[in-house]
Amino acid sequence: MIAGAQMADRPTVTVGAQPLSYHNWVHLNPGDRVIVKRHGFAAEQGTVDEISEDASYFWVWIDGQSRILIFHGDGSAIHKQF
């Protein structure tokens, strides 16, 4: 049962989260909720903080952690929550 409880604490990509390709990052805005999947890390929920003018990179505050930089080519998968 403990393993099930631990899994409940991890964000999963479910209904209400739309995968975004790099070309769709232009549709992100500060305050948007996202799920970030990075190689070697569990999926993490966060809030878009800043996005570059050309949308080639953006900053995300990961819930309960720090701010991370996401950029094209870093291997991250982004899902926008709605």
Image (cartoon, rainbow, N blue to C red):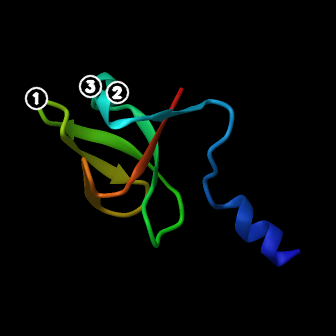
- The x and y percentages for residue 59 are 24, 47
Q: Where is residue 31 drawn, in percent x and y?
A: 34, 32
Q: Which residue is mark 2?
A: 24
Circle number at residue 6: none
Label 1: which secondary element: loop
Residue sitting nearer the eye, 28 or 66 = 28
Q: CA distance from mark 3 to mark 2?
A: 5 Å
Side of 17 where 53 appears, left or right: left
Residue sticking out furthest to the top: 27
Circle 3: residue type: Val
Q: Residue at x 26, y 53 (%)?
A: 73
* Amino acid tagged 2: Asn
Is residue 52 found left or right of 18 in the rendered image? left
Q: Residue at x 62, y 30 (%)?
A: 16
Separation of residues labelled 3 and 1 (CA atoms): 9 Å
For residue 53, the mark is 1
Mark 2 is surrounded, within 10 Å at the Cα level, by few (under 14), some (14 to 19) or many (20 or more) other residues, namely few
Query: Do residues under tags 3 and 2 come within 8 Å of each other at their CB atoms?
Result: yes
Q: Is residue 1 above or below residue 77?
A: below
Please give the residue where the numbered disc 3 appears in the rendered image.
Answer: 26
The C terminus - image quarter? top right
Counting other residues with Cα less than 10 Å from the Cα at mark 3, is it few (<14), some (14-19), or many (20 or more)? some
Q: For the residue carrying disc 1, how many other residues have a C-alpha within 10 Å: few (<14), some (14-19), or many (20+)?
A: few
Q: Are marks 1 and 2 in contact (CB under 8 Å)?
A: no
Q: Earlier in the sequence, mark 3 or mark 1?
A: 3
**Which-is-in-front pick, marks 1 and 2?**
2
Q: Residue furthest right?
A: 1
Q: Earlier in the sequence, mark 1 or mark 2?
A: 2
Q: Mark 1: which amino acid?
A: Glu
Q: Residue at x 53, y 66 (%)?
A: 42
